């Protein structure tokens, strides 16, 4: 297993963070469980801790979710799973086309 690292994802708007977290933090919990990382909210930023590759994928997933939230998109379980699949396949550039 790789070295544990931290990644920081910044949100321009707290409202977008609230959308990404979902009810009872269910959306971020899905990312944590799927990638074995920890996500902590600190004001306008998310701190992701975990194995380097997992933390990078989690950061890319959360950045994509924030981008969708900033465009007024609903963040639900299906979107979270789809975005994680795109990130795993290195196709997360397609997020811009989801809106």
Image (cartoon, rainbow, N blue to C red):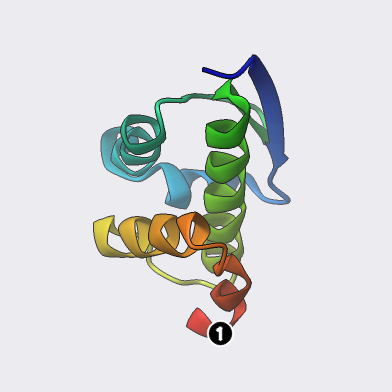
Q: Which x, y percent locates residue 22?
A: 35, 45
In the image, taking residue 60 as reference, residue 44 lies left or right, namely right
The residue that appears at 32% across and 57% down in the rendered structure is: 81
Is residue 33 depicted above or below 88 in this figure? above
Residue 99 in view in this figure: no
Q: Position of residue 9 (x, y in %)?
A: 69, 39
Residue carrying label 1: 97
Q: Which quarter of the figure has residue 43?
A: top right
Quadrant in which residue 91 is drawn: bottom right
Q: Is residue 61 visible?
A: yes
25 horizontally vs 40: left or right: left
Q: Residue at x 58, y 56 (%)?
A: 66
- In percent of width and height, residue 4 lies at 61, 15
12 horizontally vs 40: left or right = right
Graded by Cα atoms within 10 Å as few (under 14), some (14 to 19) or many (20 or more), the crowding at tag 1 reads few
The answer to which quarter of the image holds residue 73 is: bottom left
Horizontal placement of 64 versus 28: left or right?
Answer: right
Q: Relative to the observer, which residue lies in front, 33 or 45?
A: 33
Classify 87 as above or below 99: above
Q: Which residue is painted at 35% across and 64% down in the image?
A: 82
């Amino acid at each position: 297993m790789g070295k544990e690292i931290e990644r920081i994802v910044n949100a321009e708007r707290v409202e977008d963070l609230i959308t990404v977290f979902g009810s009872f933090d269910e959306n971020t919990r899905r990312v944590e469980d799927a990638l074995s990382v920890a996500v902590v909210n600190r004001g306008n930023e998310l701190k992701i801790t975990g194995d380097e590759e997992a933390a990078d994928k989690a950061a890319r997933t959360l950045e994509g979710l924030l981008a969708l939230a900033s465009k007024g998109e609903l963040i639900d379980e299906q979107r979270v799973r789809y975005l994680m699949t795109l990130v795993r396949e290195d196709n997360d550039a397609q997020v811009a086309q989801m809106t």
